[in-house]
Amino acid sequence: MKIHTYEKLWLVAAMVLIVGIIATITYGTVGLGIAMVDDQEDTISPGELNDDERFADPRVEQVGENEYEAYVVAQTFLYQPDPIEVPENSEVTFYVTSRDVIHSFSLVGTNVNTMVVPGEISVITAEFDEPAEYGVVCNEYCGSGHHDMEGMLYVVPEDEFDLTELSVTADEEVELGDDATFEVTVDNGQLDDLETTVALEIGDETVEEDVTVSGDDSYETTFTVDSTDLGEGDHDWTVTVDDHTEQGTLSVVEDLEDDEDGGDDNE
Amino acid sequence: MSSATDQSQADHGAGGSQVDQPVREIGHDEYDPIGTLTLILIYFVLLAFLWVFMYFVEFLGNDPTVIGWIGAGVGLA
């Protein structure tokens, strides 16, 4: 069979095109690691998300050096947590599920996009190299508030990122002469140790303690302040750990029985 | 190897009496559809450019992208 030279030429060109397209996809998959969203994750009962340790408390968790997992719940018409905060130079795996109807989880202007189906857990991994702000929107019509369903994802500089949580249990009222106690708990959700300073400011006094909180652990400490030094009246206090603060007011009264009047006293 | 155009012109010229006589017979390699070739090459360049643009600019340019191991998608994870 005789084939015309031109015909050979465009037969070859067509083959080159096909091979080129397949090669590009292979490069993307093998070279760059681009993947499709799959359905390998086990199913979950949408009514029992609060009993699931991943979704009962939607959050971002550190699971390795520069590796994070975000557990996100979508429901009419919001995302939890909102905003989601992750550090730059991180690889984040999102586990997203829905509490009610079909939603989607789409980072606007990016290829990070998945349907969120009640009963299914959508798992997508993405790398965030630079600080950025992304809007999260729902692109599956989910009800009358669909157009308002949005969240935010902040990719923050590494030195601004932490998973520290501060909680303070303090006396609201003490009798003049007694000690006021402040029980401070610092949770370190990251895997590296956290070296920081816990500072309590009350009135003119500042009490500081340098602490090291081990990775994925919490630290408890108690500050004691002599109410005689403060004097009678209301005293605003602030406990600070890095950028986290807890505030409250301590009332020092002459006699604890005078509860009702004591609160109104001013210095 | 015959051309419908040539034939119809030939028919017309001969007053429509002879139907099957080609005006001129050419050999296999003499046939030279350079216009068709040019058109196909333009299509080829267009397709190649649009593919590269779509994949490398429109798709990969929209970082971040979902990553992972391909095996996970086919149940090998």
Image: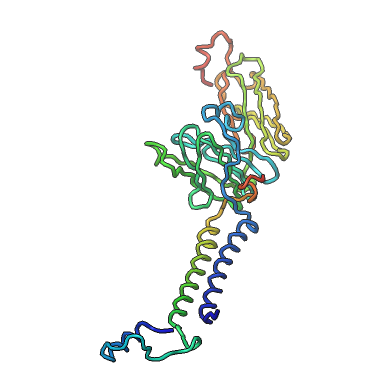
Establish if A188 lies above or below B41: above
Q: Is B58 left, or right, of A33 in this rendering?
A: left
Q: Which residue lies furthest to the top in this view?
A: A257
Position in image of residue A243 (x %, y %)? 61, 38
**Residue occupying the point 50% across, 40% down:** A116
Q: In which quarter of the image is residue A224?
A: top right
Position in image of residue B57 (x %, y %)? 52, 62
Q: Using the image as rendered, state which of residue A157 and residue A183 is in the foreground.
A: A157
Q: Using the image as rendered, state which of residue A235 and residue A210 is in the foreground.
A: A210
Look at the image and tell me in which quarter the N terminus of chain A lies.
Answer: bottom right
Q: Using the image as rendered, state which of residue A30 and residue A16 is in the foreground.
A: A16
Number of callouts in the render? 0
Q: Quadrant of residue A206?
A: top right
Position in image of residue A44 (x %, y %)? 56, 32
Q: Is A144 left, or right, of A58 in this rendering?
A: left
**Residue occupying the point 72% across, 36% down:** A215
Position in image of residue B48 (x %, y %)? 51, 69
Q: Quadrant of residue A8?
A: bottom right
**Residue occupying the point 50% across, 12% down:** A261
Q: Is B21 left, or right, of A170 in this rendering?
A: left
